[in-house]
Image: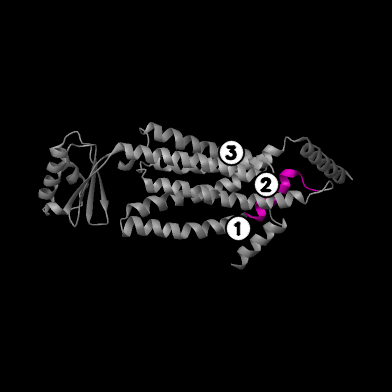
Amino acid sequence: MASFAQFGNDLYTGKRSYNIVGRRKIWYGIAAVMILAAIVIPFLRGGFIFGIEFRGGSQFQVSNTTNLSQPFASDTVTKVAASSNPRVSIVGGDSVRIQTDQLSDTESVKIQQALAVAYNVPVKKVTASFIGATWGQDITRQALTGLVIFVALAAIVMALYFRTWKMSLAAIVALLHDLIITAGFYGIFGIEVSPAAVIGFLTILGYSLYDTVVVFDKIRETTSEDGSESRRTFGESVNLAVNQTLVRSINTSIVAILPVGAILFIGALVLGAGTLRDISLALFVGIIAGTYSTIFIAAPLYAHLRSGEEAIKKRDKRTNTVRRASVTS
C-alpha cells in the first residue's frame, strides 16, 4: 500500500511520468481498431440480438423443473409450431424460458399444453405472455431520444463550464467511444440486448462524463498556472495533469467495478436474474471502456485540438527554443 501511495505521489510531483499525450497516435489506433471491431463483427454475425421487448413475440416459462435442457424445450416448441424460431434460456436456476416469434392464440395454448406434458408439470406452472412489437419500437425510440438529448445537453454544459468547445468535443468523443465499445461487446458475443441492458448503456454515460470532468478540471487547473515563462509545452502540461489524476482514475474504476462485478456474478450465476445480469454486464464493460477513454482518448484529443492554436504554437516554440539554448550552453 505504501509503495502504491509513493507511486501516486511520484506521478503527482512529476518525479515519475508516462508520456500518454505524446503517444496519442497509439491510443487513437487502439481505439479505432476496437470501434471497427465493435461495428464490423456484429454486422458479419447478422446484427444485434434484441430481446423480445424490442422485436415483439410470445414467451413461455416453465417453473420449478429439474429438466433444464435447452434443446429439449426447443424441440417441444418446434413440434407444435415449426416456424416459431424458439430461443431458450435458463432463469433462476429452476425455470426454463422460451421466447418465440409472434404466435396465434391457438398456437400459444397448444405450446403451453405441450410444455406442461413434456416437463411433467401442471399447466398452471407454464406461463404464457405476449409482447407486441409496437411497445418495443416505443422503447427504442425513447431510448434514442434520451441518448441524443443527454449528449446534446452534456456537450452544452461542458462547453459552458470549461469555457471551450474543444474540451466538450473531446469528452463527447470519449463518451461515444464507450457507448460503441459496450454495445459492440453485446454484438460480438451474441448477447441479447434487453431494456435492462439499454438502461446500463445510459448509466455508462454518467460515469464516463464524471471521470472525464474530473481529469479535465485538473487539466484546466494545471494549464492555467502556466505563464509565459513556463518550462513545459502545452502538451506536457496536459500530460502532467493526466499523470496526476491517473491513480485517482484507477482507484475510482476499481471501486466501481468491484460491486458491479459482484452483482454480475450473483445475478448471473447465483440468482439467475436476467435483469441484474444485463444491467451489471453493460456497466462492467462500460466502466472499463470509460476508464480507458478518459485517460487515453479524451485528454490526448483535447491537447491535439489545442495544438493548432497560434498562441499554443508560439508558446511551445518559445519553450523548445529555451531548452535547446540551455542544452547547447
Nearer to us in this view, 180 or 4: 180
Q: Position of residue 15 (x, y in %)?
A: 72, 57
Q: Position of residue 183 (x, y in %)?
A: 44, 41
Q: Which residue was labeled with disc 3? A: 28
Amino acid bearing label 3: Tyr
Q: Crowding at label 3, few (<14), some or many (≥20) Cα neighbours within 10 Å? A: some
Q: SS class of the residue under badge 3? A: helix
Residue located 56% across and 40% down the image: 152
Q: For the point 45% across and 34% down, which residue is it?
A: 39
Residue in the image at 62% along x and 42% along y: 168
The residue that label 1 is drawn on is 248
Residue contact at pointers 3 and 1, CB within 8 angstroms: no
Which stretch appears magenta? 231-245
On the question of residue 116 being in view, the answer is yes
Q: Which mark sits nearer the N-terminus, 1 or 2?
A: 2
Local crowd size for mark 2, using a 10 Å CA cut-off: few (<14), some (14–19), many (≥20): some
